[in-house]
Amino acid sequence: MDESIFKVVNAHFSYLNRFSALCGIDMEVRKGEKIAILGANGSGKSTLLQLLDALLFPNKGDIFAFGRQLLEADFNDPEFCRKFRSKVGLVFQNPDIQLFCPTVKEDIYFGPLQLGIEKNEAGKRIEKIAGDLGIGGLLDRAPHQLSVGEKRKVAIATVLVIEPEIILLDEPTAGLDPQTSRRIIDIIIEANEHGRTIVTATHDLHVVEEIADRVYILNREKQVAKSGPAQELLSDTELLREHNLTHMHKHRHNGQTHIHPHQHLDHHQH
Amino acid sequence: MPNAFRKNNFIERSIKDAVLFFKYSIFSEDKAQERGFLQSLDPRVKLVTFTVLCICVLFVKNIGLLIILYSFSLLLACISRINLGFFLKRTWIFIPLFSLFIALPALFDFITPGESLCVFRIFGLEFVITKPGLSGSVLFVCRVATSVSFVVLLSLTTRNSVLLRVLRIFKVPQVFVMVFGMTYRYIYLFMEIVENTYLGIKSRTGGLIRRNKGQSIVAWNIATLWQRSFKLNEDVYGAMLSRGYNGEPVLLDEFKTSPKDWIWFCLVAVIFTGVIKFGYG
């Protein structure tokens, strides 16, 4: 657990050098951890994940991965690039971005083929993952023929098939029905139990306790407002409300209207 | 008011029909999923043999032989579980119609001189249909109909995505095949965006839009769609990089031939040889 996978030191990033997305982020991800990045819309969660996946690079500050600083120039080296991409996988928020091939099967094969994995080996992995995720019947279908939940499962499959050490997930349960959402959470937990490090950006508080040991909360200033154990931070209702993660809920009980903070945490308590 | 409504109705129908046409013609793959003869063939063999059959049609100068080849295409449609009425509609209603308009002037002596077959006058002008003109036009229409039938058979019995992959046997670079595939993939997404945007506009305007306003909405929509496609382009490239893409794509190739494919290949080779020997000249 102590081996550092990612270390982010005072990272700043702005789009077109004008629109700030991150303003001084410090973060550490250790091997085998489950981490959640919480924050309201526009707080920079997706940008942070893309920095960790080396799709973007900080304007200021440093990011270290596996003990080595991530520099854009290093990705011109095909061997380094292949090694890094084999170790880190990102599930995008919008599955339509991730599924760009004409069929589901080609989409799942895409990663392994680019990374030089043998076709037979990739085929075996796909067979197993398709069975595990229940998407065996979708392999010959076109992505546009799938429901949102199916697309999300296939998007996760496209990353799992690479067997990365670290899986970055951007809002994996957003807009899904409860059953599909549950299945996705189970997949994330299973991946962690198999030794993978999981970093999830979300604002669905009800899934956080299950998919995270530690939590980073990003504020409107696009900085880390607080980090710590998931249970501790999730019980701090004032902190959550301050960062737009809970809201005041007005409703009627026994003919009387009352207001209380509502945070989608205990919806399935027995 | 009724006039404006009619105009809006026209726009609505145009958008709906265009989207519907694309969905049915590009994305309808129900015939390709039937368990018929052509569907069971290896797509590479199918593409090569149908190209050979089309070349055959170009060589044939004998109308009788063309009719035999055309009948062969109908037979193939039947054993591939394609409804004959549907198939004839696909081939005869649209494409040969245009060839008829091209062939029509060739009937007359001012394009194809020769032995006169029929003479008639329209507004005092004399029109003469010649024998070589008629046979040339019939030959042309038969050639187009037969070629189109083979092409339609190929496209109906093969999934578009597979057809794209098969292009690689013609040494089309992988990057082009991938770009074609992605274009095919995202056309549907953009069509849905256009459809939904129109519905969004309709829900807010009640369906009645004045011409100037309508023009500005359409212009705004084109600009927004372009912006979205640009953003999507960047994001998709990021998703490709994330999964190891380094500028030289490696694509899935899992075609397999069976004895049936080779029997079919030999049959087409025999037809080609026969046509070259007996039908050319």
Image: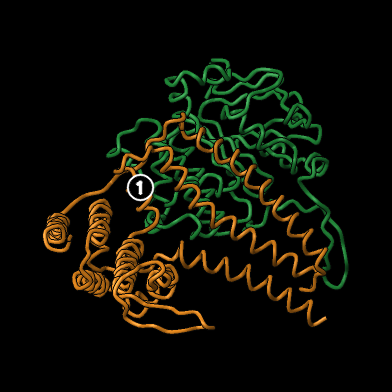
Chain colours: A green, B orange
Residue B197 image position (x, y, % from top left): 69, 61
Disc 1 is placed on an element classified as helix
* Rendered-image quadrant of the C terminus of chain A: bottom right
> At 83% across and 54% down in the image, what residue appears?
A248
> At 41% across and 44% down in the image, what residue appears?
A108
Q: Residues within 10 Å of mark 1 (few under 14, many from 20)?
A: many
Which amino acid lies under the numbered mark 1 shown in the image of this protein?
Answer: Arg
Q: Quadrant of residue B138?
A: bottom left
Residue B165 image position (x, y, % from top left): 35, 47
Residue A53 visible from this viewpoint: yes
Q: Nearer the viewer, residue A37 or B144?
A: B144
Query: In this figure, which residue is indicated by the disc labeled 1?
Result: B165
Residue B277 lies, with reference to residue A61, above or below; the image says: below
Q: Is residue A214 left or right of B276 when viewed as pictured?
A: right
Q: Is residue B225 left or right of B255 when viewed as pictured?
A: right
Which chain is mark 1 on? Answer: B
> At 77% across and 53% down in the image, what residue appears?
A262
